[in-house]
Every structure is written in C-alpha cells, then in structure tokens.
Image: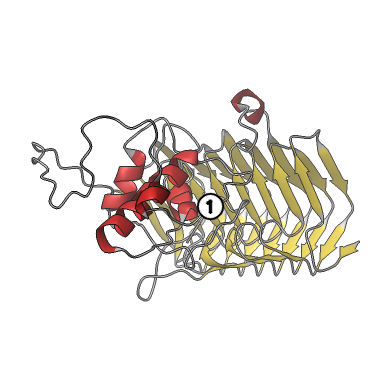
C-alpha cells in the first residue's frame, strides 16, 4: 500500500513497469499522482487507486508516449490495466488516466466517482495507436466543464484522434455524457448506458460502428459536424509601412543585441520540455510589444505549446509537438486562442493538456 502526499512512481524511457496487487491512496501531485510515465510502458493488475488527485493531468496516471523524441520507441509504449479500481480520483483532465500516444488496454476494471474540472471524467486519451476498453464499469464520473446548462465533455471517456474499441462495458450516471470522441475510428458493441444524458457524442468520426448497445433513455449522436474549426481566409498581403522606425542602419552590424535597445524581455526556462518554436515566438512577441509600447509583457509559452500540439483539438496534426509548420505560432497569435499572460497559465513541464 502506498499512501502519502506525493507522486508514487516516476519513470522516463525505462523498461516496463509491472504493478500487482497494490493500493495507491490519498496521493496528490501536479500530474499523475500515482504514476507519471514518460515513454515507459506499464502493466497494472488487481490494484486500487483511491483518492488520487492532480492539479493538471491524470488524477492517478499520466503516461506520455511522446516524451523521448524517439518516435519509433514511442510506438511501442503501452498501458494495460486489468482487474483494478479507480475511485474518487480527480484532475483537470482525465480524472483517473491521461494517455497521449501509444496503446491502451483496460479490462475488467471499475471507474467510480472520478471527477475533472474540464474533460474526461475517468479517462482522457489523444493520438493513441489503439484504445481498447472491455468488460469494465464507469459509474458516477463527472466532467464539470460546461457552456451553459450542458456540454458533452466525456463524463466517463474523452478520446481524440485514435482508434477506439469499447466492448461489453457499463456506463451509468456519468455527467456531461458517457463517451465523447473526435475524429476517431469508433467501435462500441454490447455496452449498456443509463442516465448519462448522452451515451455517445461523436464528432467527425473516421468510421463508426455501434452494435447491440442498450441506451435506455440516453441520447446517441453519431456524426456531429457542428464543431467550429479554424477559418482560413486567403488574400493578397498588404504593404507594411514602418512609421517612426528607430533603427536606421546602412551597413549590417557585427552583432545585434536587444539589450542595446532596451527591448529585452523576461528570461524563460525551457527545462525538459520541447517546443523551442513556442519560446522563440513568444519572446519575439514580447520584444515587439516592448518596442512599440515600452511595456514588458510576460506571455505563457506553455499555453502556445500545448494548445498547438497534436494532442489538442486546435493543434497541428503534423507532429505531436506541433512543429514542422512555421505557421503554427502565427495561427495561435492571430486567432482567438492566444496569447495569454504567464500567471494565467504558468509553465508545467509535465502537463500535456491545458484548459
């Protein structure tokens, strides 16, 4: 039994972790209070996760397959959970589990009374090569992020951009819908739904197969195409005129230093995170604001990086990190998404998803 105020297990690019007949209780952390795994596979059997809470991603477990920059290795990362219970776990995303990349298998397990302030009351997945849930029960899980009276945010499961197979499972009394999917190959068979408002809400499914499911009075939305995506307008660029330009140089200098002009901005620590493109773009923005107004602005690099990664509904699908597209920072800066101040969304080296 592991019971303490802190993360129990952390592993990065290590061998498989096997957990058997273990209880994780009353744990608190920023991400993955019981397990925080980077490019590491895990097998969990006959174990319990009770009262595990995280302030960001994955109340009990956060597994990030795309953490090592070895994308061949990442394809082999997997999480297998069997005969286990997740009770009273909470986070912003994925009350029990958040997984980005790799494979997920859940069998003969129970998810009861888990809670998120955003999406995925029990489980949140994105960009997996496969997600399989079978012979499991999801009851009284809550996803509290709403617009108005109701929003489909996956009271039990919230899944993006991955093949999903759910079989012979029960979804009972989960708030804001039982299952939410976006751009998934989606297969649900022999499942029971009761008192979830919506059983399934599927946006733009790549494929959809629903067979022999019991809905009771729950609503089924199979192909919702009303989600707003980015609007792209193409037009001839306007001529840019520089007014009161303070730099008048006939010959290129041997060096250029923002400090010589008083345009330097706050130092940011990239630490173990990727996303150098976000740090560069935000620094350029801050410097230009200071040049134009004389004011120092401290913007959130994390918000740009996480919002525009492939794990986000608004992100760049070319690469998990959001790179390989020079337009990505511009998309973020000129849209309604950003930028925002650092103190609203400070740096978190481990959180993959943001509100």
Nearer-the-camera pick, 330 or 26: 330
Q: Residue at x 8, y 40 (%)?
A: 239
* As drawn, 35 above or below 130: below
How many labels were placed on the picture?
1
* As drawn, 313 above or below 103: below
Residue 147 position by quadrant = bottom left
Nearer-the-camera pick, 154 or 287: 287
The outermost residue toward the top is 72
The answer to whether one can see residue 109 in this image is yes
Image location of residue 257, percent across then percent down: 41, 43
Image location of residue 203, percent across then percent down: 37, 48
Q: Residue at x 49, y 67 (%)?
A: 343
The outermost residue toward the bottom is 149
Left or right: 182 in relation to 333 = right
Left or right: 91 in relation to 260 = right
The answer to whether one can see residue 108 in this image is no
Nearer-the-camera pick, 150 or 219: 150
Q: Badge 1: few (under 14), some or many (20 or more) residues near its Cα, within 10 Å?
A: few
Image location of residue 113, percent across then percent down: 65, 70
Left or right: 148 in relation to 2 = left
Residue 43 position by quadrant = top right
Q: Which residue is mark 1?
A: 268
């Amino acid at each position: 039994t592991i019971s303490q105020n802190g993360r129990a297990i952390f592993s990065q690019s290590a061998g498989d972790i096997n957990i058997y007949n273990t209880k994780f209780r009353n744990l608190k952390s920023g991400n993955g209070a019981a397990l925080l795994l980077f490019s590491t596979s895990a097998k969990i059997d006959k174990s319990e996760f009770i009262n595990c809470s995280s302030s960001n991603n994955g109340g009990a477990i956060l597994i990030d397959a795309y953490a090592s920059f070895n994308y061949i290795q990442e394809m082999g990362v997997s999480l297998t959970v069997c005969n286990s219970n997740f009770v009273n776990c909470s986070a912003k995303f994925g009350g029990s589990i958040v997984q980005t990349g790799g494979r997920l298998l859940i069998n003969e397990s129970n998810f009861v009374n888990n809670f998120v302030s955003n999406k995925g009351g029990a489980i949140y997945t994105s960009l997996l090569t496969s997600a399989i849930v079978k012979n499991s029960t999801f009851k009284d899980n809550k996803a509290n992020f709403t617009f108005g009276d109701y929003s489909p945010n996956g009271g039990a499961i919230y899944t993006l951009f991955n093949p999903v197979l759910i079989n012979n499972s029960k979804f009972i009394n989960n708030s804001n819908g039982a299952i939410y999917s976006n751009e998934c190959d989606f297969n649900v068979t022999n499942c029971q739904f009761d008192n979830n408002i919506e059983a399934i809400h599927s946006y733009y499914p790549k494929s959809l197969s629903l067979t022999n499911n019991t809905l009771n009075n729950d609503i089924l939305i199979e192909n919702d195409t009303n989600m707003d995506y980015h609007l792209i307008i193409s037009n001839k660029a306007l001529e840019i005129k520089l007014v009161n330009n303070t730099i008048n140089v006939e010959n290129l200098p041997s060096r250029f230093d923002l400090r010589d002009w008083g345009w330097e901005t706050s130092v940011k620590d990239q630490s173990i995170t990727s996303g150098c493109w976000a740090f560069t773009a935000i620094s350029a923005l801050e410097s230009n604001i200071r040049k134009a107004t004389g004011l120092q602005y401290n913007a959130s690099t994390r918000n740009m990086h996480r919002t525009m990664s492939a794990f986000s509904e608004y992100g760049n699908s070319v690469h998990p990190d959001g790179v390989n597209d020079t337009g990505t920072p511009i998309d973020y800066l000129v849209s309604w998404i950003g930028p925002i101040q650092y103190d609203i969304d400070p740096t978190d080296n481990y959180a993959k998803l943001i509100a």
